[in-house]
């Protein structure tokens, strides 16, 4: 008899963050696929397993192959798993990433700039640069409306102090040659 919540010796140990933080961010089907992968890997004290599409479909009850494939690519993009080609084109070697790689969290580098300006990361960088500049324009030392301007976008997502400069409205406009705040 199935006793899913009774004390047992048959269990898959997972970190609570999977339930607390990751689950709310995933589509239901993506969550199902991730759970299946966790079962096939962690459930056998392995980090990687050869898993076929049909296994995933059987194991999750998802009937569409394209749903599985979009789930896999989303989980890869989010950095939770790594997928390598298996012995045939139906089988993948799927590995759980024990720690989310930085590259996955650094979509900040590629997201639209307007979106980027709304990230918590940018709000921290912005606040820190305003503090460093003591809430004054770093050119004319004026106050008022202050902008944090990117000298370079090269390190977007992991800016160094010198990558940004605090400018008042008018110095910023001069920086851009025109009144085109950014
Ligand atoms: Zn200024
Ligand atoms: Zn600017």
Image (spheres, rainbow, N blue to C red):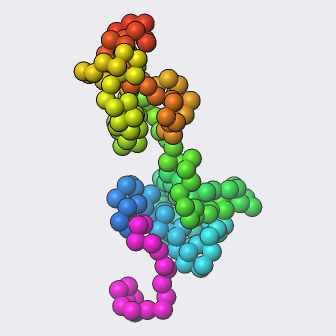
Residue in the foreground of this view, choosing between 89 and 94: 94
Q: Where 139 sits versus 93, above or below?
A: above
- Quadrant field for ligand 2: top left
Q: Quadrant of residue 101?
A: bottom right
Magenta portion: prevailing SS class: loop
Q: Where 12 sits versus 143, above or below?
A: below
Number of labels in the image equals: 0
Residue in the foreground of this view, choosing between 141 and 112: 141
Q: Position of residue 169 (x, y in %)?
A: 31, 16
Q: Position of residue 159 (x, y in %)?
A: 50, 36
Does residue 180 show up? no
Residue visible at 35% across and 86% down in the picture: 5
Image-based side of 146 in relation to 9, left or right:
left
User: What segment is highlighted magenta in the picture?
Assistant: 2-18
Residue ranking furthest to the left: 144
Residue visible at 36% across and 91% down in the picture: 6
Residue visible at 56% across and 59% down in the picture: 81
Residue ranking furthest to the right: 87
- Magenta segment includes 89: no
- Magenta segment includes 12: yes
Image-based side of 74 in relation to 83, left or right:
left
Image-based side of 78 in relation to 2, left or right:
right
Residue visible at 55% across and 78% down in the picture: 43
Q: Position of residue 25 (x, y in %)?
A: 37, 55
């Amino acid at each position: 008899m199935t006793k899913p919540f009774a004390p047992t010796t048959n269990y898959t140990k997972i970190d609570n963050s999977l339930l607390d933080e990751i689950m709310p961010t995933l589509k239901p089907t993506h969550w199902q696929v991730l759970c299946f992968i966790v079962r096939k890997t962690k459930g056998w004290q392995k980090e990687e397993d050869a898993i076929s599409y049909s296994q995933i479909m059987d194991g999750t009850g998802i009937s569409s192959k394209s749903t599985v494939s979009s789930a896999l690519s989303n989980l890869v993009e989010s950095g939770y798993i790594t997928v390598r080609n298996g012995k045939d084109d139906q089988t993948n070697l799927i590995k759980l990433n024990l720690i989310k790689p930085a590259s996955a969290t650094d979509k900040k580098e590629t997201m639209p700039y307007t979106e980027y300006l709304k990230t918590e990361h940018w709000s921290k960088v912005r606040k820190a640069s305003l503090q460093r500049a003591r809430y004054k324009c770093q050119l004319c030392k004026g106050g008022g409306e202050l902008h944090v301007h990117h000298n370079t976008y090269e390190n977007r997502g992991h800016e160094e102090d010198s990558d940004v400069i605090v400018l008042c409205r008018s110095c910023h406009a001069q920086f851009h040659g025109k009144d085109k705040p950014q």
